[in-house]
Image (cartoon, grey):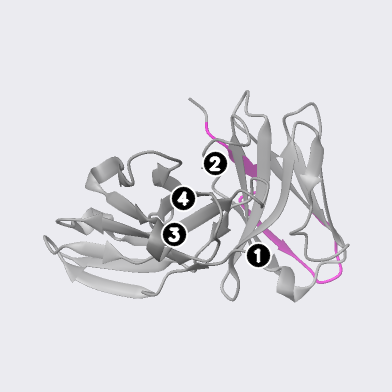
């Protein structure tokens, strides 16, 4: 069965700092990749997704992620974070052998200090 | 447009009682999913519906858990004889088809005392 690892559980940054959150998955076949965000008191929202094509994916609110197949990674980046980016971020994978279930990483709590 | 809705938003129940959680997916979405989010286990897949049928029940943690979907729309997740370890936020998601992104509801927070 596939698994997803997010190595940073808690990240604290100051506004305008650059962000990179790691995500690695364990599955050798075809995958669809997602980053979801959960703002305080709100439900999960899609930030961006990768199905195929250009491995550099741009999402909402200035976020982007790069799929590196050889490293089984899909890291999330933002050049300059804002206080409003404070949230929990989840990487998720849908593998071609897993129906349509999403396997989630453990999440990364990001706090941005104003 | 309207998103995925879930009810109740919060449910407190006594150990041993049965509970029903409801999910109203986005209109027209054929695929519906249940997940649960708990402190110890993170986000776990429970069950998936395509139309009214559930081709993947692999995530249901025990036979106390069951789910149904009627009319290709509303779904109900039932937990019988609740246990304290069932305490979690139960999330529902829907998608236009099984190949599309999933849209999540606000969840039902279940507390078993």
Which numbered dot is residue B102? 2
Q: Which residue is mark 3?
A: A90
Q: Position of residue B34 (x, y in %)?
A: 67, 50
Which numbered dot is residue A104? none
CB under 8 Å between callouts 3 and 4? no
Label 4 resides on the chain identified as: A
Q: Earlier in the sequence, mark 1 or mark 4?
A: 1
Q: Label 3 to label 2, Cα distance in Å? A: 13 Å
Label 1 resides on the chain identified as: A
Question: Mark 2, residues whose alpha carbon is within 10 Å: few (<14), some, or many (≥20)?
Answer: many
Q: Is residue B106 inside the magenta stretch? A: no
Whether residue A89 is visible: no
Q: Which residue is mark 4?
A: A33
B62 on left or right of A32: right
CB under 8 Å between callouts 2 and 1? no
Tell me which segment is drawn in magenta.
B3-19
Question: Mark 4, residues whose alpha carbon is within 10 Å: few (<14), some, or many (≥20)?
Answer: many
Query: Which residue does the image show at 39% across and 75% down from the upper left?
Result: A7
Q: Label 1 to label 3, Cα distance in Å? A: 19 Å
Q: Label 1 to label 4, Cα distance in Å? A: 16 Å
Q: Label 3 to label 4, Cα distance in Å? A: 11 Å
CB under 8 Å between callouts 2 and 4? no
Query: Which residue does the image show at 25% across and 44% down from the upper left?
Result: A61
């Amino acid at each position: 069965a596939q698994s997803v690892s997010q190595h940073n559980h808690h990240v604290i940054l100051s506004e305008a700092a650059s962000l990179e959150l790691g995500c690695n998955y364990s599955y050798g076949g075809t995958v669809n990749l997602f980053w979801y965000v959960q703002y305080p008191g709100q439900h999960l929202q899609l930030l961006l997704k990768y199905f195929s094509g250009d491995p550099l994916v741009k999402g909402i609110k200035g976020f982007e992620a790069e799929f590196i197949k050889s490293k089984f990674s899909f890291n999330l980046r933002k050049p300059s974070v804002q206080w409003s980016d404070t949230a929990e971020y989840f990487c998720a994978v849908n593998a071609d052998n897993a129906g349509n279930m999403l396997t989630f990483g453990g999440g990364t709590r990001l706090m941005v200090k104003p | 447009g309207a998103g995925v809705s879930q009810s109740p938003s919060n449910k407190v129940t006594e150990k041993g009682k049965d509970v029903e959680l409801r999910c109203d997916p986005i209109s027209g979405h054929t695929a519906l999913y249940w997940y649960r989010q708990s402190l110890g286990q993170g986000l776990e897949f429970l069950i998936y519906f395509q139309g009214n049928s559930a081709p993947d029940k692999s995530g249901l943690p025990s036979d106390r858990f069951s789910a149904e979907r009627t009319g290709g729309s509303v779904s109900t997740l039932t937990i019988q004889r609740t246990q304290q370890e069932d305490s979690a936020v139960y999330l529902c998601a829907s998608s236009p088809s099984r190949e599309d992104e999933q849209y999540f509801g606000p969840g039902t927070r279940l507390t078993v005392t």
